Image (cartoon, rainbow, N blue to C red):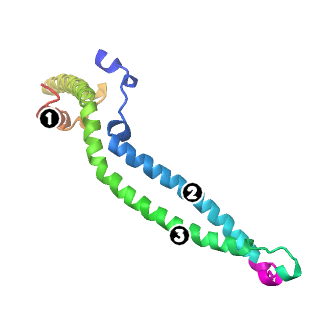
Amino acid sequence: MSILKKSPAEFRVPSLSEADEAYAALAARMAEISASLTGLRREEAALETAVRNDRGAPRPMASDVAKLLGDAVDNAPAERAKRLAEVRREISTHERAIQVARERLATAKGAASVKVCDAVRPEYGRRVKALITALEAAAAAREDYERLCDELAGADVEWTRLGVFRPNFLGDRRDGHVQRLAREAREAGYVG
């Protein structure tokens, strides 16, 4: 049972970004664009509120009239409306950039996944081997159990008084799930 006692916490799967610098750079750039987009959306919401409030306020007088009267010129409403239009254009650009970045990340994910798989292959193989070893031990114990049941039945003993345990989850007794899984692991080279 020492195979099962080894702590899985000793091994950590590297992230796609840790395994591949190109993927990491794309992911970082996308995060920057997303953060910028979040800020722009906050600014858009604040500007929309201000522009709505400007519409309810008395109409400012024309700047040339205000100058003649010696009043202060209030360009703030016009500047807010102008900035809102700029922010909306920037949001649209950011959204298109994020879509392109997502597509690039999806493409880069394949190469990064290969690097992660290469890095974890030895540990993966160790765990597959431990699993197959444990399952084969379970299959052997099951076979011993089944032989005893066969002997009891062959001796015409009403052995069901002992309790009937059928490990059907292991599949067919002679060609079950354990055997198929072990065969696949051998074909993949994880088990000798």
Camera-near label (1 vs 3) is 3
Q: Of the residues under marks 2 and 3, which one precedes in the sequence?
A: 2
Q: Choose between 182 and 92: the one closer to the eye.
A: 92
Residue type at numbered disc 3: Arg
Q: Which residue is mark 1?
A: 188
Circles 1, 3 touching at the beta carbon (< 8 Å): no
Q: Position of residue 27 (x, y in %)?
A: 41, 47
- Please determine whether, in this image, residue 21 is positioned above or below residue 126: below
Residue type at numbered disc 2: Thr
Q: Which residue is mark 2?
A: 38
Q: Which residue is mark 3?
A: 89
Relative placement, left or right, of 24 versus 78 is left
Residue type at numbered disc 1: Ala
Question: 10 Å neighbourhood of mark 2: few (<14), some, or many (≥20)?
Answer: some
Q: Choose between 148 and 142: the one closer to the eye.
A: 142
Q: Of the residues under marks 1 and 2, which one precedes in the sequence?
A: 2
Camera-near label (2 vs 3) is 3
**Which label number is shown at residue 54?**
none
Q: What's the distance in space between the residues labelled 1 and 3, CA to CA? A: 53 Å
Tell me the SS state at disc 1.
Answer: loop
